[in-house]
Amino acid sequence: MQPTLAPQNVPLLDLNAQNGSIQNEWSAAIETVTSKSQFALGPAVRRFEQSFADYVGVDHAIGVNNGTSALQLALQACDVGPGDEVITTPHTWISTSWAISYVGAKPVYVDIDPTTYNINPELVAAAITPKTKAILPVHLYGQACDLEPLLSLAEQHGLTLIEDAAQAHGAYYQGKRVGSHGRVGCFSFYPGKNLGAFGEAGGVVTSDQAVADRVRRLRDHAQDGRHNHVEIGYNARMEGIQGAVLDVKLRYLDEWNAARRRHAARLRELLEGAAGLQLPAVDSADSHVWHLFVVLVDGQLRTTLREDLANRGVATGVHYPTLVPFQPAYAHLGYQRGDFPVAESVASRCVSLPMYSELTDEQLWYVAAQVRDCLGGAKSAAA
Ligand SMILES: Cc1ncc(COP(=O)(O)O)c(C=O)c1O
């Protein structure tokens, strides 16, 4: 039976709901770190690194200070630098490109797939030049990229494949977790991610011993033994408290991701056929971890839909309104409107609806009913 639709506030994400459910565990873990003053790296970070490497299915995980550093250090450890090109997606959070720029390489963008919104492997093939050194796909919104063609291109052309898995903790591709397919995988543990710290944190995963050793050194002032700095390094260490919290939360990740999958299926069911709304593609392998639930609406309707939903207590977001190559910071690369027809269309129409593991069935009903109601009252520009 349909629950009553009492007005409610549904945030885009509710971190307190999740943290409150396991408070005893994380507070005890934090207490251990603080009582021993193990604030930077230390045993809690080492424990988390081991558990996370086992979880992803790789030999090494290296805890760093955020996901942007994870990408930068991974690229550097794979010898990507000045004069190199890295092929990536225009439709992502800007950090993917920052990291390429930080190491002195040039981002080269190709358009996305219209179904998954991930990088289009066919266009990657066409963008490879003698300067190409790496491919950096992003598993956007929690869904794995089509890695097989990317991996075979990398092998054919001697390129490094680095996965940006910042939005896809626990997602699978062909039975293996994302992050374990390329030479290196990079994660963000920013608080709002599927696996989120209590502050900034990130991680690099790899089964390549040389890459692991170099990232481990680079994050800690490039020390090879105390006070022996073998190259220009960084302070990119993970904090002890973040390692402790992440080690606790990792035990719940699969359960939380399963809840997200159920919510996504429910939202799809409740929103099916709503006028002017394009739902995210069904994941037949059920390996999507639904970091975000993104629908597409007619560009003219997006602003009014978001305003109407906000007035009814339903928060929404836009991930992302402007493609990275069209950001002022990347104007010098010279990309033009029309270069990425699919990504430009998605960027102009995407709306993120509330998605987190603690959503209740009543909230899901409420969100879907409000979306339907708002769209029903709206006039499509195409109508
Ligand atoms: C796809 C993607 N890459 C990289 C990052 C960077 O992670 P952080 O914010 O931890 O630096 C994020 C985080 O928002 C992301 O979503």
Image: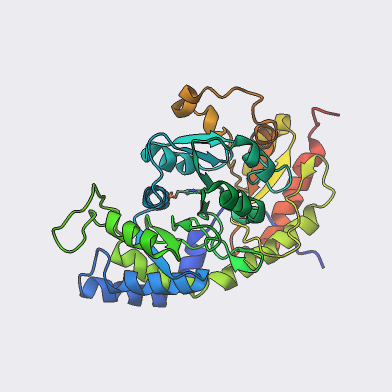
Q: Taking 383 as reference, is 20 above or below it?
A: below
Query: Taking 6 as reference, is 212 left or right?
Result: left
* Colour approach in the figure: rainbow
In the orientation shown, which residue stands out farthest toward the left? 227
Residue 236 image point, x, y percent? 30, 54
Residue 152 image point, x, y percent? 62, 53
Q: Quarter of the image containing the N terminus? A: bottom right
Which is more toward the observer, 302 or 333? 333
Q: Taking 89 as reference, is 138 above or below it?
A: below
Query: Taking 32 as reference, is 226 left or right?
Result: left
Q: Which residue is drawn at 38% across and 57% down?
A: 201
Query: Taking 214 as reference, is 145 left or right?
Result: right
Q: In which quarter of the image is residue 34?
A: bottom left
Q: Residue at x 78, y 34 (%)?
A: 378
Query: Taking 305 as reference, is 68 left or right?
Result: left
Q: Quadrant of residue 104?
A: top left
**Res. 336 in view:** yes
**Res. 292 in view:** no
Residue 262 image point, x, y percent? 69, 66
Residue 86 image point, x, y percent? 50, 40
Which is more toward the observer, 159 or 106? 159
Which is more toward the observer, 74 or 35? 74
Q: Taking 105 as reference, is 260 above or below it?
A: below
Q: Quarter of the image containing the C terminus? A: top right
Give the tally of numbered discs.
Answer: 0
Q: Residue at x 31, y 66 (%)?
A: 241
Q: Taking 213 as reference, is 75 above or below it?
A: above
Q: Which residue is drawn at 80% across and 31% down?
A: 380
